[in-house]
Amino acid sequence: MSAETLLDVVDLAKTFPNGTRAADDVSLSLTRGQTLGVVGESGCGKSTTAKMILRLLKPDRGSVTFEGIDVLRAKGSELKEVRRRLQLVPQNPQTSFNPRLTIRASLEFNLRAHGVPRRTWRSTVDDMLLRCGLRVEQGNSYPHELSGGQLQRAAIARALVTGPDLVVCDEAVSALDKSVQAQVLNLLSELQSDLGVSYLFISHDLSVVEHISDRVLVMYLGRVVEQATSEALYADPVHPYTKALLSSAPGAPIERIVLQGEPPNPADPPSGCTFRTRCPWVMDTCALERPLLATTPAGSLAACHLNLSSRPLATSSPA
């Protein structure tokens, strides 16, 4: 880890009892004060990876290092401190808030759980509600009394009230309409600028990820298939799966790539490259060897035999 690296994840893997390989040697790193977007179809392993980083789910193997602390082995006061500094904004605030507690009570519960002195609770909660675009008196509301956008702002306030260094946003705006999404994304950016917090931002929406992320990691069937800066990924994607995702977005600058067939069974993935059964550029070697992440001429990382063999990848599908 470099001095600026906040989070370093190496070869995280998780296979569920039914045989599903939800995460297959996932590695990533996150720099302090920046946002790493994680994108991919439903079931690709995004949320499973996040839960292992947060130690809500035990991995089969791999390591998670947070500012020099081994998260998976931390105990006692060290684990408590890690949990304070690693917070979560879940997808659905309607189900993550206790309906019998006011918003203020929920935020204060988070402070109490992490040992923050009671005398500071009111001022800390008031400040965070205002920072997140809510009125102080809305802290006395119950979850059902707030709109979806207001409740998601409250969820962000609850995550930030302990002063974390890293917040995992797991599909944090997917339940909101587009206008409210934009407001919440702008809020997250403002809070990052003011507080210096880092985000691990998980989403299936490519336009949302582009808006907020400094770097982007693309997952397919439990594996990382491409990593790049946001600018490089959207300007010149390398992996065929990334190209297909970007081509499906409204107003995409590249020709639409229609993938054939359904995603493979994650309990019985294809040999070699797991994307080969849907890839328009599949080669014989794709069934025999698993492609590893390798540096592209532009400095990105992509796990594709076309990249490894330095063969050009066309922008549109072959005839």
Image: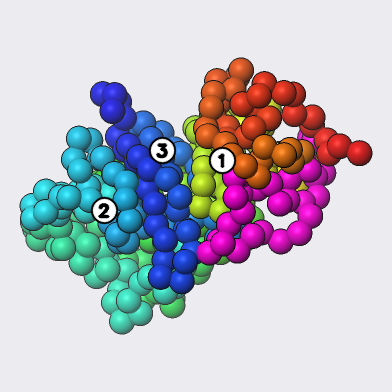
The residue labelled by disc 3 is: 28
Left-right relation of 260 to 126: right
Q: What is the three-letter code of the residue carrying label 1?
A: Arg
Q: Position of residue 168 (x, y in %)?
A: 38, 50
Where disc 2 sits, the SS reads loop
Crowding near the residue tagged with mark 3, few <14, some 14–19, many ≥20 C-alpha atoms within 10 Å: some
Task: Say whether marks 1 and 2 touch (CB < 8 Å).
Answer: no
Q: Earlier in the sequence, mark 3 or mark 1?
A: 3
**Can you tell which quarter of the image residue 7 is in?**
top left
Residue 8 appears in the picture as rendered: yes
Seen in the picture, residue 236 relative to 13 is either above or below; the reply is above
- Residue drawn 53% across the image and 34% down it: 292
C-alpha separation, residue under disc 3 versus residue under disc 2? 26 Å
Residue range highlighted in magenta: 252-280
Q: Position of residue 187 (x, y in %)?
A: 46, 46
Q: Is residue 195 magenta?
A: no
Crowding near the residue tagged with mark 1, few <14, some 14–19, many ≥20 C-alpha atoms within 10 Å: some
Q: Which sits in the foreground, 129 or 226?
A: 226
Q: Earlier in the sequence, mark 3 or mark 2?
A: 3
- Residue drawn 36% across the image and 76% down it: 142
Given the current orientation, which residue lies at the most extreme bottom position?
A: 100
Q: Position of residue 35 (x, y in %)?
A: 44, 38
The residue labelled by disc 2 is: 161
Q: Which sits in the foreground, 109 or 241?
A: 241
Q: Is residue 257 magenta?
A: yes
Seen in the picture, residue 205 relative to 155 is either above or below; the reply is above
- Residue drawn 52% across the image and 32% down it: 293
Where disc 1 sits, the SS reads loop
Left-right relation of 251 to 149: right
Q: What is the three-letter code of the residue carrying label 2?
A: Val
